[in-house]
Image (cartoon, grey):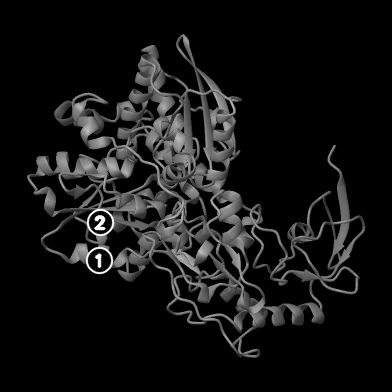
Amino acid sequence: MEQLIQLTIDGVRVEVPAGATVLEAAKKAGVNIPTLCYLKDVNQIGACRLCVVDVGGRALQAACVLPVSPNMVVKTNTPAIREARKINLELLLSNHDKKCLSCARNQTCELQQLCRDLGVEDGDRFAGSMNKYDVDDLSPSIVRDNNKCVLCRRCVAACGKTQAVGVIGPVNRGFNTAIASPFGKALDDMACINCGQCIAACPTGALYEKDGCARVWELLADPKKHVVVQPAPAVRAALGEEFGLPMGTLVTGKLAASLRRLGFDRVFDTDFGADLTIMEEATELLSRMKTGGVLPMITSCSPGWIKFCEHYYQDFLPNLSSCKSPHEMEGAIIKTYYAEKMGIDPASIAVVSVMPCTAKKFEAQRPELGHHGLADVDAVITTRELARMIKQAGIDFVNLPDEDFDSLLGESTGASVIFGATGGVMEAALRTAYEVVTGQELADVAFHQVRGVEGVKEASIQLGDATLNVAVAHGTANAAKLLDSIRRGEKTYHFIEIMGCPGGCVTGGGQPIVPASVRLTCDPRAVRADALYREDAGKPKRKSHLNAEVQALYKDFLGEPNGHKAHELLHTTYTPRPKYKD
């Protein structure tokens, strides 16, 4: 039975499990203690000292790392505490670039919000020497501006602990301490996987996505370009947050409507590409199982995971599915099948992908993802960037009428929608594989064994006479644990899904930022995933092979799944990458 501890916080008696921190107990008591370096399940180091409280000792203590004890009496709001917090905040500001209006995190910055909450108006009380850093903007995905850094180390923990990449960390000492890569290298020279989890963890504008809005506005203004857009499944479960809607609000119809009003010539849906991916990937898996191909086969939808594999687990490259990711597949089909159907020169078509993922920016630049000298995808913007474009265009997003995606490449099934959640690709593939193998209708399409936010999930699925051993991992640190167990011979699987970001695409590096204070009481991974499962449940078709537009694509253009033409357009290869560029 769980042991409970009773304590008093600001006169409120509260009971919490043993091992809880004062910060967690205060939240339960309805008391909000300010934090900056703290990030639930990621970073608990008590470095910023903004969460200090009085527990009757000689010194104030950091609530985020202070365990509760029986009958503890905690004060969170005394003159000394308020003054200490204010001084600590002003000391941080004394070495901070305060150009807020031009900052990517203006109005979503936790430091800015703390200044409002704690009554810090100018931050010049301790004005003096300031460090000056060059902005690292060489990466195709991530910009790093140490002039905005508050040394909270949340990005360091996300990169090292959550992702097991560890390409950034503190260097130097004292006033000269900075967050940097080894040898002073740029992120683009490191084995950075471009996942953007450092951005999602950062409380300020020290890390942000490489802006693609200007490029998209330029394409939309070019009369010689036929501009096609495709949003990913996870975007519809998070975009509304940028306009004040509650987390988990589905905005599928408003998403399509807003893209149309921005001026795109065609508004397709990457969900179509997800259904197409399942046709290719499920066929590839069954083929490998029948012919003695390399197993376990591992999904290839997540570009952050793919780059992680190329850098750190090169012996597993043969295990990767040869399938391109859904938006790259759809881009290839737009510039061939769609161009042919519409009588448009493929060279005049520009494909824009709206993704929850910063790694997609890197992926779109891969030279192997194209055909006849044309890239499959010409530009990638994140969910956050799309929100900025909608606001710049003066579109009243919340009050938009719901609209559908354009036909030909816009139909989707419930199986494609759940691609945005960890376990979704696996579940979608199982729905189709079951019916292909058994020839029988799958009545209950929900594979709950692979759902949820547990780091690694395992299941054995019966497909007729065959048993399929599967595993699902999300976050590359969990992927590393899973792959290490396979290396040691402890685990044997046929099929593995890996998503580079914790929770899958719903919490990708390009999704709306969730403040640390919100994460204390809410799990964005679960809330946003639930929205996708709701949309899946409401779809008339929930299996990828039932998508009529996908069926027409194979009948009229591709032939059969994994056939010659499909391989030419929809499949690729991956190669080892060094951990450091020369």
Number of residues whose C-alpha sits closer than 10 Å to that of mark 1, classed few (under 14), some (14–19) or many (20 or more): few
Hey, what amino acid is under mark 1?
Trp
Q: Position of residue 56 (x, y in %)?
A: 91, 70
Q: Can residue 67 be seen in the rendering of this structure?
A: yes
Identify the residue shown where x is 27% and y is 44%. 368
Q: Position of residue 54 (x, y in %)?
A: 84, 71
Q: Nearer the viewer, residue 580 or 408?
A: 580
**Mark nearer the viewer, 1 or 2:** 1
Q: Position of residue 575 (x, y in %)?
A: 36, 41
* The quarter of the displayed image where residue 38 is located: bottom right
Q: Can residue 475 be seen in the rendering of this structure?
A: no
Q: Nearer the viewer, residue 441 or 218?
A: 218
Q: Is residue 258 above or below residue 437?
A: below
Tell me the SS state at disc 1.
helix
Q: Residue furthest left?
A: 343
Distance from the alpha carbon under mark 1 to that under mark 2: 14 Å
**Which badge, 1 or 2, is on the more N-terminal residue?**
1
Residue 333, disc: none
Q: Is residue 564 above or below residue 69?
A: above
Hey, what amino acid is under mark 2?
Arg
Q: Nearer the viewer, residue 406 or 351?
A: 351
| Quadrant where the C terminus is found in the figure | bottom left
* 409 lies left or right of 45: left
Residue 260, disc: 2
